[in-house]
């Protein structure tokens, strides 16, 4: 396994997850396996045969890796990072995504998301870096009151021993992070992966070269972000704007 991992350019841990079925085999790995074993396209053919076979969703796969991670670098362009959301913000987000959901269903989704925070109980917890687009702060979810509570909670994450939160200002303009969410994952064995999530799709990237490209995209955007102190100042300004919003009639 170690020799094969070295030849195809994946970590031993990744190859082990492919073998056990804990991770889906990436398409770009198949021709490499055919080259190593001299199987004349067998792995590529098998991949095509199995392409549409149901596989545990990427979100569940990511949750397992998140619990194992020693460091997470997350970009979110449309909403607050799930690990930092308040219950009120979660409720508004889930309602917006599925207006017909029952109260019980929404409550279950909130409980599941809150349970993700168990990773912070580890000693030490994973180092979490979050990069938020400024538009996330100004996109009202639920109500001004919900946003005030969420942004005040966010202030406590700006700069601490195990991570920081920073804001990428709108004035920066374009950048290379196009997904709603991109998370760079570092595991204890040295493996690095990237998880991408859009509106209705998600993708786990394990090929080292592609992971490196995604990491560089994140770092390029982060280079133009405000410092934690500057980000906190912006958040306080936005909180004041929400506080000045007209109250709806009773």
Image (tube, helix red, strand yellow):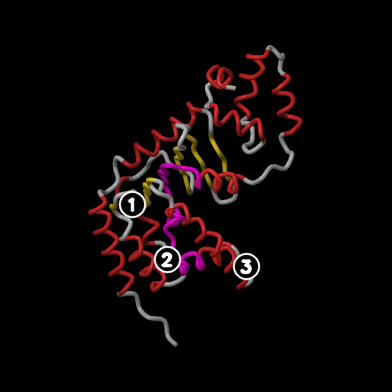
Q: Is residue 140 above or below residue 249?
A: above
Residue at the spot x=31%, y=60% of the render?
A: 156
Nearer the viewer's eye, disc 3 or disc 2? 3
Quarter of the image for residue 99 reads bottom right
Name the element at disc 2: loop
Please give the label number shown on residue 105. Answer: 3
Sequence-first disc among 3 and 2 = 3
Looking at the image, the residue that sits furthest to the bottom is 250
Image quarter (top left, top right, bottom left or bottom right) of the N terminus? top right
Q: Any magenta on residue 78?
A: yes
Name the element at disc 1: strand
Q: In x, y percent, where is residue 221?
A: 35, 41
Please give the label number shown on residue 165. Answer: 1
Looking at the image, the residue that sits furthest to the top is 38
Looking at the image, the residue that sits furthest to the front is 123
Magenta segment: 67-92
Nearer the viewer's eye, disc 2 or disc 1? 1
């Amino acid at each position: 396994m170690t020799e094969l991992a070295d030849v195809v350019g994946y970590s031993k841990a990744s190859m082990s997850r492919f073998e056990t079925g804990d991770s889906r085999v990436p398409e770009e790995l198949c021709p490499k396996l055919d080259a190593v074993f001299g199987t004349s396209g067998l792995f590529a053919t098998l991949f095509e045969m199995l392409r549409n076979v149901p596989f545990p969703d990427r979100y569940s796969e990511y949750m397992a890796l998140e619990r194992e991670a020693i460091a997470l670098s997350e970009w979110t362009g449309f909403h607050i990072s799930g690990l930092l959301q308040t219950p009120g913000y979660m409720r508004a987000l889930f309602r917006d995504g599925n207006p017909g959901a029952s109260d019980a269903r929404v409550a279950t989704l909130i409980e599941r998301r809150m349970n993700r925070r168990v990773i912070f109980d580890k000693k030490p917890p994973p180092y979490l870096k979050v990069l938020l687009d400024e538009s996330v702060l100004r996109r009202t979810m639920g109500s001004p009151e919900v946003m005030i509570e969420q942004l005040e909670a966010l202030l406590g994450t700006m700069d601490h021993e195990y991570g920081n939160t920073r804001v990428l200002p709108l004035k920066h303009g374009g950048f290379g992070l196009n997904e709603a969410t991109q998370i760079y994952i570092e595991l204890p064995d040295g493996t690095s992966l990237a998880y991408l999530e859009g509106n209705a799709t998600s993708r786990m990237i394990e090929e080292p070269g592609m992971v490196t490209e995604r990491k560089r995209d994140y770092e390029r955007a982060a280079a133009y972000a405000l410092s934690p102190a500057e980000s906190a100042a912006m958040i306080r300004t936005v909180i004041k704007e929400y506080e000045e919003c007209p109250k709806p009639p009773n």
